[in-house]
Image (cartoon, rainbow, N blue to C red):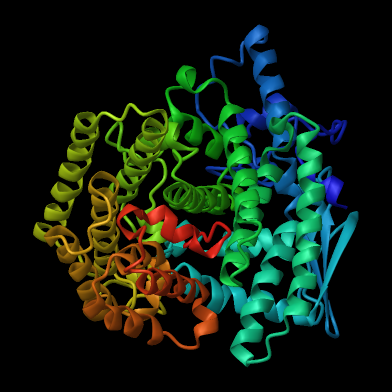
Amino acid sequence: MLWNIMTMDLPHGSRHNGTIRSSNGCWTCRLRRKKCDEKHPVCDVCDALHITCHYAQEKPEWMDGGVRQEEMAEQLKREVREKAHLRRGERTVHISGDRVSVDRMDPCLEASTIRLQRGPDCTLLSNEARQSVAFGRSDTILLTFYLEHLFPFLFPFYRPSLLQGGRSWILEMMISSPVVRQTTLCESSYFFSLARGTADRDVVWEKARDAFELLRESLQVINGSDITVHLHGAARIMASIMQVQRFEIAALSFNNCHAHLSAALALFKQLLDSVGPVEQVGGPGSSFGIVISRLGPTSWILPSQRVQVPSAEQAAFRFSSALLVLDDIVASTMLQEQPRLYEYHRGLLGNIDGTGPAIDLETSVGCQNWALLQIGEIAVLDAWKQQRKRVGNLDVMELVHRATAIKDSLETHLARLDTDPAINPKEDGSLLDVFTTDPYQKSTTSPSQSSLATRVWAHAALIYLFVVVSGWQPASVDMRYHVGQIIELLAHQISPPSLLRTMVWPFCVAGCVAEPAQEASFRGIAEALQPPSVFGTVRKALEIMANVWCNRDAADAASRDLATCFRSQGDLALLV
């Protein structure tokens, strides 16, 4: 079963022979010698195959009866093969008692072989079905809990428009991919047990072992072949790795953080490299866009009105990439290493051509790109400083020069946030606004909250920069100012307080350099979040701070840095 999922892009044989050629339909059906229903703008045949439907009054130039027509025919054949996984995405759902069975449709079936039944069974059937994947009622409860409660709690800033598919891609991924479903169940069962006050770590870790085994087997398939053959499978695996990472971090199990991060980073780089050398395709942003395109096509919800939404793999890859960039940058501050995606930062996070960044971190994690870009730059500067110190040739003038450019950029952006307040959502709008706004999130995570969250990250970045350049000086005027700003934002402006779990790294940075009189403020902010077990990373950050406070007068305190504080707990405590 898993092998078939992971080889979803492998070529298949021809589908049907002897079909009637259309003389008035789309040019795609004419070229493929298929009967076209002539629906506009996309016919049912092309829609079912998820391939390009070419409609035009004039005959296309490539319909020349010669070489160009043959090339287009081959291109369409490739497109049919490459979209095979999407046709597998069509499901037959049977509900019987407390079991839900999901049958995968044979990709060789055309849309004409499907019929919709209504009544007690309400089942979408195919003439031939295979690879039945069943899951029980307890699983459906956990998956619903994840969709309706856990995911919005973990990622409160991620609120895609319903007209762009909303979070539907998560449900599609859970249904269609066992590896995604198992990692989701693992995370959901942990938080569900916490919500009921009946946490059983043995049961949860049993699910975790199942998820790890599925991931291991899936990665083995990809490692043994060209990733372009498994493009969609690779996107699903990457999404699963990021979910496993979030689960383990939530459970305060940091032993595998580095391994998970390395696996996801390697997979991400392979996906971007699969489209060709970065410099030849126009940079990382272009490579990312090409991968997104190949993970399509978008789905037609209302073909007659040309309403399209991203495919599940497109949405999953975009969202997972944002989490990966964040994790990589935060990890680099703890390891005193250059972020491993640093060479991609400007191309992925910068607004190179004026069309917006390829990855928008604000819509996923609540922090605007510029703040995390500069934190990445500070990590690079810190790594450079440590390397130069080891060989004994640190150039202090160069250190200050590079730090000044980062400081100026951060302060300029911060000033801009103060003068350009975020636009709050309208309280009353059109009917369209009702459907495009998440009613459960509207009042809690408005654009003003991501602006405030970005301020928290930026003030923490300046603290981090001062420590890298000037050393451990908690009593300095600059340090006290930025720590005070973060306390003010977290204690009095960020709402609801639970949003703190998306800002644990800056919270910890500020707490580590806090003055004794400020300790109570940090304890109060953390202890206001109940129950503590649900906010595990906040609790971990408080442990790191408390360790620094207890050793404030230690002999080596003057030589301390933030990376030392983060590593005081042993493993890589990824505070995300």
Numbered-mark total: 0
Residue furthest to the front: 555
Q: Position of residue 179 (x, y in %)?
A: 75, 57
| Quarter of the image where one finds residue 365 | bottom left
User: Where 170 falls versus 467 (above or below)?
Assistant: below
Does residue 422 appear in this view?
no
Question: Quarter-wise, where is residue 401 in the image?
Answer: top left
x and y percentages locating residue 227 in the rendered image? 70, 33
Q: Horizontal and vertical percent for residue 553?
A: 32, 68
Q: Position of residue 557 (x, y in %)?
A: 33, 60
Horizontal side, residue 316 vs residue 332: left or right: right
Q: Residue furthest top?
A: 66
- Residue 409 versus residue 260 in the image, above or below: above
Q: Give the residue displayed 46% in from the left and 64% down from the top.
A: 162
In the depicted view, which residue is nearer to us: 424 or 185? 185
**Residue 91 located left or right of residue 47:** right
x 49%, y 78%: residue: 535
Up the image or down, 152 lies above or below 381; here it is below
Is residue 211 visible in the rendered structure shown here?
A: yes
- 534 sits left or right of 74 in the view: left
User: Which residue appears at 76% of the width and 61% of the height?
Assistant: 211
Q: Residue furthest bottom?
A: 197
Tell me if 212 is positioned left or right of 41 in this view.
Answer: right
Find residue 399 and report its image quarter.
top left
Seen at 61% across and 49% down, the residue is: 313
